[in-house]
Image (tube, rainbow, N blue to C red):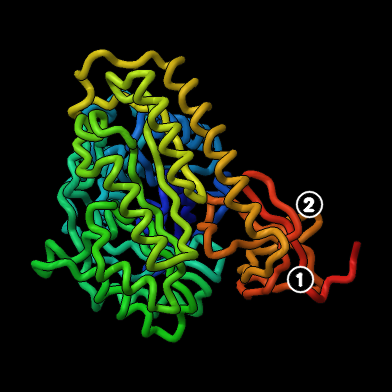
Amino acid sequence: MLTNKIFGVISLGCDKNRVDTEKLLGLLKSRACTLTDDLSKAQIVIVNTCAFLQSAREEAIDTILECAEYKKGVLEKIVVTGCLPQKFVDELYEPLSEVDVFLGINDYEKIFEALEQAYQKDARPNFVGKGADGYLSQRVQTTQDHYAYLKIADGCYNHCTYCLIPKIRGKYRSYPMEKLVDEAKELGELAELIVVAQDSTRYGEDLYGENRFVALLQALSKLENIQAIRLLYCYPDVIMDELIEEIATNDKILKYMDIPLQHSENRVLKLMNRKGTRDGYLRLFEKLRKRIPNIAIRSTFISGFPTETEEEFEGMKAFIREAKLFNCGFFAYSREPDTGAYRMKPQIHHNTKKRRVRALYQTQSEVAYSVLSAFVGKQIQVLCDGIDYERGCFVGRAYFNAPDIDGKVYFHAAEAMQGKYYQVLIENNDEYDLFGRTEDYEGE
């Protein structure tokens, strides 16, 4: 019966959640289910949710309620999966009466059984926690064809006091290396493979009794279908010499690292249960730049953490100026229940948090403008992602641009194809993007 139904799928949250959604789509495809991007035509809608922050939970609930409006048409069932039901199903089961099926983060393979119950008994099955956490390899890619994410682990060891992830996703769990390599092979010809996990650099410690991140990168680098590998979410305390050397010497690994720091001031870092220090972070950056002179480092920071003083906020601004990172994301602290920081006092007023975040972005924009200015007048390799019709030019990314979270390179060319690399002469920049042209472009 279900194979005759038309499915629509919505994915919310991070790139790791995107991979989960792609594997869910792979399950649907394996049963020859029909998929649609037009929710008004879907008989079953699946919403894969994020619950990391209050804002993410609100977005998920709003999305579910918006989907419920389609029940006035052909929509029959709403399935909610992922982080939101995994953590909050007990609180939401009754209020979210619009939802017909609940599945957690490890229950995707139960979707058909749950839906059959929902149809046959007119019930609202709660299958959270009933799955086997089996490794799913078949995927339906939702990114552009020339790049894809590879999620190498789930869960987290780092019990940061602001973070719900361990309470939602559980302990760190590495996926078997041979299965990851096979999955990467099946993704087809890729200009870029993006390696992700909540903490990518701890790969293998739980599964093999030792860190095997470098070994995994070496295995992935041998695949002929992958041209380049990008590393996201590398925790600073696990960036060892072996990894630095691999990045420096492996031509397939882009000279780029996303290193989430979350703060710079020692007292706040300790309250966050982060293992680093301000001086230690700066020494790490110095070490990376010495061995990999052209490396691009990005990071994320939280401002307005409980008890954060104006002096510590100013200290973070000074750190941003000194660190000279290519790009940063700044977030106002979100007070999350069931975390260590929830009861810390004093909590910072939301207006103060917003002001500090704005100031940090302004500081980083000045740093980034200076960093990007160094590329003006130079040729750099750019991966074409397509056409920006509003600007009337092609758009792509350099090695220091990850999809969605970093800037872009806008360029004119006589011709360019999505998924191909081009040498682009950079003519201008702003605080976020670069602008240029290829040699064959004869326009003004």
Given residues 77 and 12, the one toward you in this image is: 12
Q: Quadrant of residue 173?
A: bottom left
Q: Which mark is residue 391?
A: 2
Give the mark toward the camera: 1 or 2.
1
Label 2 is placed on what type of residue?
A: Arg
Q: Is residue 72 above or below residue 23?
A: above
Given residues 76 and 83, the one toward you in this image is: 83
**Residue 389 locus on image (x, y percent):** 77, 55
Q: Quadrant of residue 64?
A: top left
Q: Residue furthest left?
A: 209
Question: Which residue does the numbered mark 1 point to in the structure image?
Answer: 438
The local secondary structure at tag 2 comes to loop
Q: Is residue 26 above or below residue 111?
A: below
Residue appearing at x 22%, y 63% in the figure:
203
**Residue 134 locus on image (x, y percent):** 20, 63
The local secondary structure at tag 1 comes to loop
Q: Where does the N terminus fall, quadrant-wise?
A: bottom left
Q: Which mark is residue 353?
A: none
Q: Quadrant of residue 16?
A: bottom left
Q: Where does the C terminus fall, quadrant-wise?
A: bottom right
Callout 1 crowding tier (Cα within 10 Å): few <14, some 14–19, many ≥20: some
Q: Is residue 253 above or below residue 409?
A: below
Side (left or right) of 72 relative to 99: right
Side (left or right) of 21 relative to 127: right
